[in-house]
Image: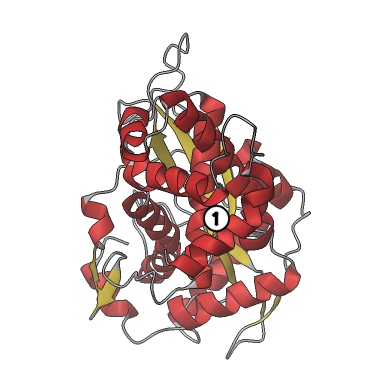
Amino acid sequence: MDKEQLDSIVTLIKADIQKQDTVMRPSILAKARLAVTLRYLVTGNSMASLSLCYRMGRSTISGIIAQTYQAIWKNLQPIYMKPPEKDDFYAIARDFYEIWNFPHCIGAIDGKHCRIQCPANSGSDFNNFHEFHSIVLMAVADAHYKFIYVDVGAKGKENDSSIFARSGFGAALRNATLPIPDPSSLLNSENLFQFIFVGDEAFPLQKNLMRPYPRYSSLTTQQRIFNYRLTRARRVVENAFGIMSVKFRILRSSVNCKLDAMDHIVKATCVLRNFLITTNSSRYSLSIVVDREVDGNIIPGTWRNSSFLQPSENLSGNAASPNAIQVRNMFMEYFSCPGAVPWQNLSVQNGLF
């Protein structure tokens, strides 16, 4: 983050964090309050360590950080993570097609566990199948690794399917209240295709939400090609989580705080990521950190060596409607002929799709 970006955030949140001077002492400036909070999020240092670094009392540091990360979410979210309108979805779909060769994709969805220390009297509610305590971050990302929806706070023992069903995004998708564009044709095809989100096996197959064909069954070549093309687009959200854990090391430790505070911490890191990518994508370099493909082979990004955001459990017992199955089959047939890319057969031979 450069000075201009820091000043931009200060301008947005100053009204919520700046205090008045008193006859006893001058107040701590808004820029200093933001600097303390960013250092906490980026390094994961303890309050005691920050107290020594900034020569402030521990309770003062704690109060500043709690107030500032809430102000970051409150003021940056309406600008850098506002819910997409129909025109925004068209732009997202265009980017997914140009960058990831997946037409009519308007977002990739996934869930990740964020480590916490076991809350008092919570029993095993927050203990996940990785055998540590966590809350779950459910997010939807666009083609540039930016989050367009986030839902934070579900208990670690829950799986993606149940969290998705209860989330505001899941309800809006189920009730058809999202401003998703109407179906339209694709290049070299006269059929009308739905605009869709892509997810892994944890999510239900719906008209506007695609998941892979079951990998435990015997798949045809066409089905494996569809799985490859979907996985290639869906990997965007995995990389978005990975980038966040690399840049904000608070997510690498088991945070000891109240649950609502942890919710605010995670949401603040999500919107700060969007801010950094939006305001200076060239400085916020991603080329080595993220996964990439060379000659049909996937080269894992460096975040996979250091990420402490673990995937949530891939369980889903939802029966798909005939309409949803038809939509997936249409995309499968399109990817195998009119919408094929030259390297997909080699990638399917090299991968487990």
Which quadrant of the structure image shows residue 197?
bottom right
| Residue 313 or residue 184, whichever sits in front | 313
Left or right position of 148 against 249 = right
Q: Which residue is drawn at 55% across and 38% down?
A: 264
Which quadrant of the structure image shows residue 310?
top left
Is 267 situated above or below 186? above
Q: Residue furthest top?
A: 121
Q: Which residue is drawn at 32% across and 26% down?
A: 132
x, y (%) of residue 292?
A: 29, 71
x, y (%) of residue 316?
A: 49, 39
Amino acid type at mark 1: Val
x, y (%) of residue 23?
A: 64, 32
The secondary element bearing badge 1 is classed as strand
Q: Residue at x 40, y 25 (%)?
A: 256
Residue 154 at least partly seen = no
| Residue 208 or residue 43, whichever sits in front | 43
Q: Which residue lies furthest to the front in this view?
A: 23
Q: Residues within 10 Å of mark 1 (few under 14, many from 20)?
A: many
Is 160 situated above or below 233? above
The residue that disc 1 covers is 140
The colour scheme applied to this rendered structure is secondary structure
x, y (%) of residue 286?
A: 34, 69
Q: Which residue lies furthest to the bottom in this view?
A: 188
Q: Which residue is drawn at 34% across and 87% down?
A: 342
